[in-house]
Image: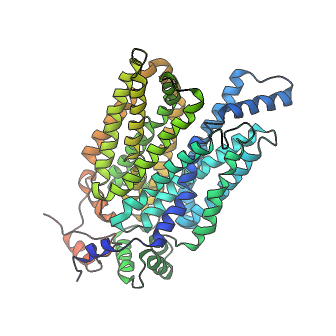
């Protein structure tokens, strides 16, 4: 029989150095690079455009037209999202062949190639190398944002699965902040050093290549997809810091028996299966709101508001660092609180708070010239929007994608989530300038509507997933999916196989009539 106090005992067990190392180093070479590439092109933008002009002049003997420079720069920035989409489309196949850890390791090759192209493009007098480099680092990010949350979710005990999963969000924010710091004029944000900003891409990739091979693969992947029980046992032992992991192995075996189809499902099979229909809709809505809620667009206004507030142009880059700092701090606090508060409350709070502060920002921007202190309130609203985003919406959509689907559907779910993520990202970059030109400061009201609609949907549909097994979470969607719940006899048969340890992925509760 299972001691009901075992779960509490496991919660008191310290988190092992192996688990923390796996979470940190897998995120360092993955989500950190994604965050870094979001901000790294901002400070050297003028220098890169000047390089394009000089290269064009050397090639064709005449200066490049303004429209051509704008087009080349737009391609350089936006092709990152195209690469991300290509990476998301390929991740399902790669994780099936190489596993979660193997995919992360392979992904470093893209980062190293991109680093070389972006660093040497100026010396080679080739702006094509910069554009191709941005495409390749986009592929790296597209793979990373799918494979990393999958790996983190599968190596974590359920009572800290959210906190470990937030390493993804924290390292994204830390990457953004690092890009802002290194882009300062005193460091690499100079005309003679800007290409070295891209050399830095190789450092996290090399560090991950040196460390991650010595850390375990996902034990769930090893046991359920590779049938490698010895490998899964060793992985459990390292992650949990104990020798006897028979209960954990038995639990994963029980979950495997409960799944009708153990083969990895394709995207088409996932789309056709009514048993996961609302899980899929929830992920699509949440991931779309993650990109369409307006955080990316907020950067368009930051420098302008600071200039209106009277700050000298030469100190604006240092004040802008506050946005990266607030972003990182909010993500860390969210990681510490997620297992106490839960996923659903943090998501609802984040989106609703963003709606409030976007509304206030719209008001303050329209009165910005009437009062000298109004721009300061606008900037406070920008910081509040960023903090609200990172408190929940900034990382939890990736955690939910791993939690709402069982093992066989997870790769396909991450592929669909990645496609939605990158298409939405591209749509914001493409459409926001037109919204801004047409609606001016009222463009933020579009994001208010999106945040409110996301909040309502999550409040009505999303169940809380905190401290629940993967199967418990799937069963909580049974009623809305209009599928029958498991029969009592099926639950009783499986319950004998289940223990109450920290890696309890599969505890089925008695049926309620």
Q: Quadrant of the C terminus?
A: bottom left
Q: Is residue 117 left or right of residue 305?
A: right
Residue 442 visible in the shown view: no
Q: Is residue 453 left or right of residue 319?
A: left
Q: Residue at x 46, y 69 (%)?
A: 19
Snapshot quadrant of residue 85: top right
Please identify the residue farthest to the top as the structure is shown.
370
Placement of 120 over or under 67, stated as above or below? below
Measuring from the top left, give residue 444's x and y in whole percent.
41, 27
Q: Nearer the viewer, residue 399 or 118?
A: 118
Snapshot quadrant of residue 190: top right
Q: Nearer the viewer, residue 447 or 316?
A: 316
Q: Is residue 484 left or right of residue 380?
A: left
Q: Residue at x 43, y 66 (%)?
A: 154
Q: Nearer the viewer, residue 67 or 274?
A: 67
**Number of marks drawn:** 0
Q: Residue at x 27, y 47 (%)?
A: 461
Please identify the residue farthest to the bottom as the structure is shown.
244
Placement of 501 over or under 397, stated as above or below? below
Measuring from the top left, give residue 426's x and y in whole percent.
53, 37
Measuring from the top left, give residue 136's x and y in whole percent.
66, 48
Q: Residue at x 60, y 30 (%)?
A: 314
Q: Quadrant of the N terminus?
A: bottom left
Measuring from the top left, give residue 97's x and y in whole percent.
57, 66
Residue 171 visible in the shown view: yes
Q: Is residue 504 left or right of residue 47?
A: left
């Amino acid at each position: 029989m299972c001691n009901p106090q075992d779960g509490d005992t496991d919660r008191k067990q310290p988190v092992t150095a192996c688990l923390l190392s796996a979470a940190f180093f897998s995120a360092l070479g993955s989500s950190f690079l994604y965050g870094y590439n979001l901000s790294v092109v901002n400070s050297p933008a003028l220098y890169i455009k000047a390089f394009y002009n000089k290269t064009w002049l050397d090639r064709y003997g005449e200066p490049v037209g303004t429209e051509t420079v704008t087009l080349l720069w737009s391609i350089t920035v936006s092709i990152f999202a195209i690469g991300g989409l290509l990476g998301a489309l390929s991740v399902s196949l790669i994780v099936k062949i190489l596993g979660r850890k193997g995919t992360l390791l392979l992904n470093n090759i893209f980062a190293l190639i991109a680093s070389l192209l972006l660093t040497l493009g100026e010396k080679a007098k080739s702006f094509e190398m910069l554009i191709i480099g941005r495409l390749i680092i986009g592929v790296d990010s597209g793979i990373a944002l799918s494979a990393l949350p999958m790996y983190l979710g599968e190596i974590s005990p359920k009572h800290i699965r959210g906190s470990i999963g937030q390493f993804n969000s924290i390292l994204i924010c830390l990457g953004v902040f690092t890009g802002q710091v290194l882009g300062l004029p005193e460091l690499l944000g100079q005309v003679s050093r800007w290409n070295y900003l891209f050399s830095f891409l190789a450092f996290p990739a090399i560090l991950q290549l040196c460390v991650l091979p010595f850390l375990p693969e996902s034990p769930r992947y090893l046991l359920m997809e590779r049938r490698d029980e010895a490998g899964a046992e060793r992985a459990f032992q390292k992650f949990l810091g104990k020798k006897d992991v028979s209960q954990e192995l038995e639990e994963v075996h029980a979950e495997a028996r409960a799944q009708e189809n153990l083969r990895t499902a394709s995207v088409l099979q996932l789309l056709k299966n009514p048993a996961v229909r609302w899980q899929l809709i929830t992920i699509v809505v949440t991931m779309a709101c993650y990109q369409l809620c307006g955080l990316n667009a907020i950067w368009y206004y930051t420098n302008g508001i600071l200039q209106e507030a009277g700050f000298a142009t030469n100190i604006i880059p240092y004040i802008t660092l506050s946005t990266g700092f607030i972003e990182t701090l909010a993500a860390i606090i969210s990681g510490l609180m997620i297992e106490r508060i839960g996923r659903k409350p943090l998501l609802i709070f984040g989106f609703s708070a963003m709606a409030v502060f976007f509304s206030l920002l719209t008001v303050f921007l329209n009165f910005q010239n009437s009062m000298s202190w109004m721009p300061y309130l606008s900037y406070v609203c920008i910081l509040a929007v960023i903090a609200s985003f990172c408190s929940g919406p900034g990382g939890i959509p990736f955690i939910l994608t791993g939690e709402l689907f069982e093992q066989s559907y997870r790769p396909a779910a991450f592929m669909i989530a990645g496609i939605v993520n990158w298409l939405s990202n591209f749509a914001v970059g493409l459409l926001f300038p037109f919204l801004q030109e047409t609606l001016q400061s009222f463009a933020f009201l579009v994001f208010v509507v999106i945040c409110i609609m996301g909040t309502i949907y999550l409040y009505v549909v999303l169940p809380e997933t905190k401290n629940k097994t993967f199967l418990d979470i799937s069963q909580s969607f049974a009623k809305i999916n209009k599928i029958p719940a498991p029969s009592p006899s099926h639950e009783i048969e499986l319950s004998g196989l289940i223990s109450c340890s920290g890696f309890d992925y599969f505890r089925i509760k008695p049926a309620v009539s």
